[in-house]
């Protein structure tokens, strides 16, 4: 073996020996440190019942105190500060707030327990921790709670004074000239951060310098460069008048009239539109000029008979489409014409439909004379108006009550003479029987089928004998059937002292024959006796004379134009005494 190889073998044998030496020294140092740590730990371990020296809670030194002593100290100081305000500032704004105002409550027991943990542990470990507290100290933040509603309300109050929201760039008009007004970043409270600052500060036991509230920047959402195109659009819109057309009709919209219609880009918007109070008023005026209600074909009564007034289509402005057309014209530098959009509204009854209904002449008519006080005249005229213009189809039934509905004071009916339980009195809608009687007689003379009619309880001499008709909503009605093959139109004509009811349709030349029985007494005069202590025994006095009950009957025979008997009706009327 060579000398060189021998040397190599020697070096390889020495390396494990060096490692063992390093390991021995490391173990020795670790042992010494452990012993030293144990000695220091034992030296500073102190009592486990006391909080480590150097520990603070909410800025208050509680080192060396027991848990009970620390808790008592903290609670006493907290109670003294419950109504002592802390000054919070934001710029030039100052806000003084007390813990009681926000319902701040501190969990001092939990804070003391956390402080004990900072210097706790077993034997030497506790001592080392306490040595750390003695050298570096520790401040435990106590758990703090507050009323969420009170905090939110306080944040809102502070925000009203502190917040300065951003202002976006906008397009404004200087006369008829469009300019871009630059925006500005704002500054607002950082509500979440401010809430933490308020609660934690009010929960602490320190009262010193004013506390600054955190704010954050409220950046613009639209800057001047974003409005370059919109400003050009405004300039184009105001560059020349616009003409509006609807068929042959034209309107000119001058530049100064265009300006109030524009919804300029503002408050985060970047496009031009139409809107605002000025535009709403303008489009309403256009609608007023364009809109027209459809007119149903109807009938006009003249001295020569009845004629048809032709139907007419209506027109309704399509506002959204018209506004779009106007905006398109405003944004065009050359095509400055906007076509107004409108919808045609068809009438419910066309002229052809009216002709097909066959209303061409009088089928039945009757006139009655009326009078009385102003309230009765009001009721007669009002109910005549309610039934005027009623259309009755072939085979349909006319109902007086269904047509007028309940006759109430809310509809305008007034107190007037009326028959109640066989006696004269007053009631709402007194006098309407004048109209029902006239309608009954018009249907009677027209030879129509009358299916329901009731006479008055008392005989009324100014009505045709046996041909009166009373009504009372909803139980006593007047009904007749249109038993012709064409429509009927009921019209009323109210004069100062007379009422005419005409039934128009296709005249069928019915012949009506009537036979009326005389009015006869049907019983003795009813007597109502009333005791009067002022009269002598056996003496009687007639205070008011009455009439006996009476009755009559009316027979009506109705023949067709060819002589066929259509109706043979008899109405018997009984009138109370």
Image: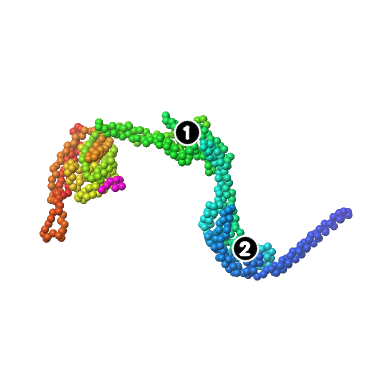
Residue 45 falls in image quadrant:
bottom right
Q: Position of residue 438 (x, y in %)?
A: 22, 40
Which of the two residues, 380 or 299, is positioned nearer the viewer here? 380
Q: What is the magenta range? A: 409-415
Residue 294, magenta (yes or no): no
Q: Nearer the viewer, mark 2 or mark 1?
A: 1
At numbered mark 2, what does the secondary structure look like: helix, strand or loop? loop
Q: Secondary structure at mark 1?
A: loop
Instruction: Name which residue lies at 53% across and 43% down.
Output: 267
Residue 179 percent location from the top left of the image: 55, 38
| Contact? badges 2 and 1 (CB < 8 Å) | no
Q: Is residue 416 left or right of residue 119?
A: left
Left or right, 87 with respect to 573, comes to right
Q: On the image, which quarter does residue 293 sit in?
A: top left
Residue 254 - label: 1
Give the farthest residue toward the top. Answer: 248
Name the residue at 57% across, 38% down: 228
Label 2 – label 1 distance at C-alpha: 74 Å
What's the residue at 48%, 38% (across, down)? 260
Side (left or right) of 517 relative to 95: left
Is residue 406 among the parts visible in the rendering? no
Q: Earlier in the sequence, mark 2 or mark 1?
A: 2
Per the image, the residue denoted by label 2 is 59
Q: Counting other residues with Cα less than 10 Å from the Cα at mark 1, is it few (<14), some (14-19), or many (20 or more)? A: few
Residue at figure coordinates x 57%, y 49% from the top left:
187
390 w.r.t. 417: above or below: above
456 or 165, nearer to the observer: 165
Q: Farthest residue toward the left?
A: 538
């Amino acid at each position: 073996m060579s000398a060189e190889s021998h040397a190599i073998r020697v070096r390889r044998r020495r390396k494990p020996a060096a490692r063992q030496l390093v390991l021995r020294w490391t173990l020795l140092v670790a042992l010494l440190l452990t012993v030293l740590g144990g000695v220091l730990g034992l030296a500073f371990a102190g009592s486990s019942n006391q909080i480590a020296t150097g520990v603070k809670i909410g800025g208050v030194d509680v080192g060396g105190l027991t848990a009970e002593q620390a808790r008592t100290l903290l609670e006493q100081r907290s109670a003294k500060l419950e109504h002592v305000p802390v000054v919070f500032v934001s710029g030039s704004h100052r806000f003084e707030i007390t813990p009681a105002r926000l319902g701040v409550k501190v969990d001092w027991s939990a804070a003391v327990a956390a402080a004990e943990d900072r210097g706790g542990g077993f034997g030497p470990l506790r001592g080392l921790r306490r040595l750390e507290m003695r050298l570096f100290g520790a401040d435990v933040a106590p758990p703090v709670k507050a009323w969420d509603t009170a905090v939110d309300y306080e944040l809102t109050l502070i925000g009203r004074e502190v917040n300065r929201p951003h202002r976006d760039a906008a397009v404004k008009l200087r006369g008829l000239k469009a300019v871009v007004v630059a925006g500005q970043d704002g500054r607002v409270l950082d509500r979440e951060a401010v809430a933490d600052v308020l609660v934690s500060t009010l929960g602490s036991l320190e009262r010193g310098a004013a506390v600054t509230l955190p704010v954050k920047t409220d950046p613009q959402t639209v800057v001047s460069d974003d409005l370059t195109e919109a400003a050009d659009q405004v300039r184009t819109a105001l560059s020349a008048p616009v003409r509006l057309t609807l068929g042959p009709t034209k309107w000119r919209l001058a530049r100064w009239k265009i300006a109030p219609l524009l919804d300029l880009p503002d408050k985060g918007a970047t496009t031009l539109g139409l809107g605002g109070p000025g535009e709403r008023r303008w489009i309403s005026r256009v609608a007023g000029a364009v809109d027209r209600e459809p007119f149903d074909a109807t009938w006009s009564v003249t001295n020569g008979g009845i004629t048809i007034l032709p139907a007419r289509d209506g027109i309704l402005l399509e506002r959204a489409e018209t506004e779009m057309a106007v905006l398109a014209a405003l944004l065009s530098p050359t095509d400055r014409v906007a076509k107004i959009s409108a919808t045609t509204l068809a009438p419910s009854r066309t002229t052809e439909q009216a002709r097909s209904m066959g209303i061409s002449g009088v089928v039945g008519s009757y006139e009655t004379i009326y009078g009385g006080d102003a309230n009765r005249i009001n009721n007669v005229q009002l109910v005549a108006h309610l039934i005027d213009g009623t259309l009755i189809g072939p085979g349909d039934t006319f109902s007086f009550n269904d047509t007028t509905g309940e006759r109430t004071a809310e509809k305008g009916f007034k107190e007037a003479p009326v028959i109640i339980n066989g006696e004269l009195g007053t009631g709402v809608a007194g006098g309407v029987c004048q109209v029902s009687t006239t309608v009954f007689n018009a249907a009677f003379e027209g030879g129509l089928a009358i299916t329901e009619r009731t006479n008055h309880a008392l005989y009324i001499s100014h009505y045709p004998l046996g041909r009166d008709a009373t009504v009372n909503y909803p139980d006593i009605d007047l009904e007749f059937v249109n038993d012709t093959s064409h429509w009927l139109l009921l019209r009323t004509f109210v004069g100062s002292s007379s009422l005419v009811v005409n039934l128009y349709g296709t005249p069928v030349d019915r012949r009506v024959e009537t036979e009326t029985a005389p009015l006869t007494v049907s019983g003795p005069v009813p007597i109502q006796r009333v005791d009067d202590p002022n009269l002598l025994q056996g003496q009687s006095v007639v205070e008011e004379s009455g009439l006996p009950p009476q009755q009559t009957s009316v027979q009506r025979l109705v023949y067709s134009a060819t002589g066929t008997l259509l109706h043979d009706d008899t109405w018997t009327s009984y009138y109370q005494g």
